[in-house]
Image (tube, rainbow, N blue to C red):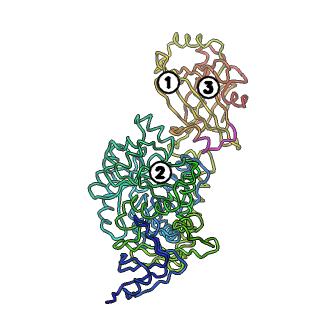
């Protein structure tokens, strides 16, 4: 008897991507409800079934939909925001300040819908995501009809959707409970990376993944710096560090793995960790080239991902597949590694295993979900083609075909695209919204980047408080004489400190911006050894505000911020037009003189070698107060045996000017 089915694909070049890499040159696939019911020749299947719909696939490849193994889909709204920058400058200087301001459930929903449209157009039927408000990623993905592993991000610092990691963990559990057993969405948890997690986060996220038997998505060894830091802080590379918290007992999706050694590869293989390789992102951010041919040799499952569009800048999986194959060849010097069939496998059946959906999708096999695409291989750039080698069809897909050749796409037995027309997403509605948001963010960034001051605030941590400083500085021939005078006086000394200071002054085109000083402060203990190092940024106002007498100056606008990033980071972020370097040895006393707190600094300038200086200064918040303090400062200078002098080098301002 002829059996009724929903859809019969006929006359297709079927690539099953099963373990035997079965192909049918004039093949057919029968779909019932959400799954694949039969695979065979057109002749055989036409006799067996009475389909509600027949799809003639002449001139096309019918294959499993592609698997994007690592993405941050809502970031589609941030496409092109901050390109050609180093990872830290891009992330901390651009992406994170914008995310803090704009990422909310609506943002995530809109970005996800747009990403789904782009994924469908490039032949993707499943993806693994990691972002904030992941519940909205799941909502928008389910509406679009795509299959996804949606992983809620957990960070050790506040994020757009959680003020603490406990909150993010609670949100993860809530989302997992809500979406567990959904036909398209697999909810999961994502401790962002070992270096952005605490031990507590790694433990709790693992416990959550194991409790609900859901995947755990994490970035591993993306940059060489991450490994260097791990060796320094944890005294071991990234993979063994993570292993000790039993993280790999969960179903792990490890993104990047660019800088892992042979032993670490063995560890990942032992635990069945899926590796998501992101060739474009790794190239664009200069992270390095993952050794995927070695991983594949060792039996690891390696999938291919786009990462977020802001480090790509698109979600074109055909580009990623081609690049994965080419990069492996170019970097190993061996054109036989990662052959085309392997590259297609990584983007389909193996990719599905990487995101732990291998049981459901990734190949055309009876019982698997009907996640299928049709690729037109009759276009100009695909012609002519040879078929004497059974692998030539894979080579055609990897080296010649383009994502625009994907004509039709089905997920879970439902059409999401026919003849390149999207059936579940209305782009005319979404695109104007995205552009309006981009223009708003543009305005925000222009405002934030209009001055050194607002850039300092944007990068975080600056105290938005202004203070003035009364200061007098004179050159001294014998600093020990001054120190002796200080000790002999009856000044009340509150404390003494000894520092070695390395200052880099950034200067800008507009002198009104003032200078930004990056200071490395080494505290020297009584034995003369370095006790502690502090890094700080100080924005110093443009000019001396006022000169009270010939020698007392009032400087203004000192904004102080901790400087957790490297000097290189700040140089690339603030883009100064000029720099001056000063190195000095500083002995500092905090004293009370006529009820006013003063700092007395005895400095020896080592770079440039300009000798010793005595500086007396006091903080002040009003001009009236400053006037009074200026007089007292003069008297204090006299007490220490120094005469105020109109000296060309009487303050560092002039030293810096003179030097550059
Ligand atoms: Zn990523």
Q: Are marks 1 and 3 in contact (CB under 8 Å)?
A: no
Q: Residues within 10 Å of mark 1 (few under 14, many from 20)?
A: some
Residue 576 in magenta stretch: yes
- The residue pinned by badge 3 equals 583
What label sits on residue 230 in the rendered view? none
Q: Nearer the viewer, mark 2 or mark 3?
A: 2
* SS under mark 3: strand
Q: Nearer the viewer, mark 2 or mark 1?
A: 2
| Position of residue 236 in the picture relative to residue 600 (left or right) | left
Foreground residue, 283 or 290? 290
Measured Cα–Cα span from mark 2 to mark 3: 41 Å
Q: Is mark 2 within 8 Å of ligand 1?
A: yes
Q: Residues within 10 Å of mark 2 (few under 14, many from 20)?
A: many
What's the magenta bit mostly, secondary-structure-wise?
helix
Expressed as whole percent of the image width and height from the top left, the position of residue 22 reads 43, 69
Sequence-first disc among 2 and 1: 2
| Position of residue 241 in the picture relative to residue 418 (left or right) | left
Foreground residue, 597 or 432? 432
Sequence-first disc among 1 and 3: 1
Within the image, what quadrant is residue 32 found in? Answer: bottom left
Foreground residue, 434 or 288? 288
Residue at figure coordinates x 57%, y 71% from the top left: 404
Residue positioned most to the left: 211
Measured Cα–Cα span from mark 2 to mark 1: 39 Å
- The residue pinned by badge 1 equals 523
Sequence-first disc among 2 and 3: 2
- The residue pinned by badge 2 equals 256
Compared with 653, 68 (above or below) is below
């Amino acid at each position: 008897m002829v059996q009724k089915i929903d859809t019969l694909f006929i006359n297709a070049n079927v690539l099953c991507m099963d373990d035997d890499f079965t192909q049918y040159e004039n093949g057919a696939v029968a779909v019932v409800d959400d799954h694949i019911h039969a695979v065979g020749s057109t002749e055989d299947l036409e006799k067996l079934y009475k389909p509600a719909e027949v799809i003639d696939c002449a001139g096309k490849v019918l294959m499993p939909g592609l698997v994007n193994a690592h993405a941050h889909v809502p970031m589609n709204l941030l496409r092109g925001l901050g390109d050609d920058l180093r990872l830290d400058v891009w992330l901390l200087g651009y992406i994170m300040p914008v995310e803090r301001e704009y990422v909310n459930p609506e943002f995530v929903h809109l970005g996800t819908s747009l990403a789904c449209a782009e994924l469908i157009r490039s032949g993707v039927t499943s993806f693994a995501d990691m972002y904030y408000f992941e519940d909205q990623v799941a909502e928008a993905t389910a509406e679009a009809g795509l299959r996804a592993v949606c992983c809620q991000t957990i960070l050790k610092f506040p994020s757009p959707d959680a003020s603490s990691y406990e909150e993010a963990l609670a949100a993860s559990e809530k989302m997992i409970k809500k979406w567990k057993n959904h036909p398209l969405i697999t909810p999961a948890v994502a401790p962002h990376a070992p270096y952005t997690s605490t031990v507590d986060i790694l433990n709790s996220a693992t416990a959550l993944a194991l409790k609900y038997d859901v995947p755990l998505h994490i970035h591993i060894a993306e940059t060489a710096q991450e490994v260097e830091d791990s060796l320094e802080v944890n005294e071991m590379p990234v993979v063994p560090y993570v292993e000790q918290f039993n993280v790999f007992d969960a179903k792990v999706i490890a993104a990047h793995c660019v800088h892992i050694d042979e032993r670490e590869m063995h560890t990942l293989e032992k635990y069945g960790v899926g590796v998501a390789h992101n060739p474009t992102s790794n190239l664009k951010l200069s992270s390095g080239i993952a050794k995927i041919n070695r991983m594949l040799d060792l039996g690891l499952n390696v999938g291919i991902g786009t990462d977020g569009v802001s480090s790509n800048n698109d979600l074109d999986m055909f580009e990623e597949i081609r690049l994965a194959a080419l990069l492996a060849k170019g970097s190993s010097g061996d054109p036989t590694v990662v052959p085309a069939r392997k590259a297609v496998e990584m983007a389909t059946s193996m990719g599905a295993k990487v995101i732990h959906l291998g049981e459901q999708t990734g190949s055309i096999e009876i019982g698997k979900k009907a996640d299928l695409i049709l690729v037109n291989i009759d276009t100009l750039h695909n012609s002519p083609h040879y078929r004497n080698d059974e692998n030539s069809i894979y080579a055609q897909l990897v080296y010649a075909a383009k994502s625009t050749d994907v004509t039709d796409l089905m997920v879970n037995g439902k059409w999401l695209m026919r003849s390149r027309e999207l059936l579940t997403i209305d782009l005319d509605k979404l695109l104007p919204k995205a552009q309006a948001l981009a223009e708003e963010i543009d305005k925000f960034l222009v405002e934030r980047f209009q001055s050194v001051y607002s850039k300092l605030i944007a990068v975080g941590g600056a105290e938005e408080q202004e203070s003035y400083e009364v200061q007098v500085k004179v050159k001294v021939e014998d600093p020990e004489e001054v120190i002796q005078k200080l000790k002999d006086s009856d000044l009340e000394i509150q404390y003494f400190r000894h520092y070695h200071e390395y200052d880099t002054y950034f200067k800008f085109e507009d002198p009104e911006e003032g200078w930004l000083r990056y200071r490395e402060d080494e505290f020297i203990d009584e034995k003369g050894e370095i006790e502690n190092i502090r890094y700080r940024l100080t924005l110093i106002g443009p000019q001396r505000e006022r000169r009270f007498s010939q020698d007392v100056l009032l400087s203004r606008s000192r904004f102080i911020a901790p400087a957790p990033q490297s000097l290189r980071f700040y140089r690339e972020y603030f883009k100064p037009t000029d720099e001056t370097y000063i190195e000095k040895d500083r002995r500092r006393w905090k004293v009370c003189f006529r009820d006013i707190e003063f700092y007395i600094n005895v400095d020896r300038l080592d770079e440039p070698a300009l000798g010793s200086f005595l500086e007396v200064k006091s903080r002040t918040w009003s001009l009236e107060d400053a006037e009074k303090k200026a007089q007292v400062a003069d008297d204090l200078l006299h007490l220490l045996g120094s005469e105020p002098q109109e000296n060309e080098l009487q303050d560092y301002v002039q030293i810096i000017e003179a030097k550059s």
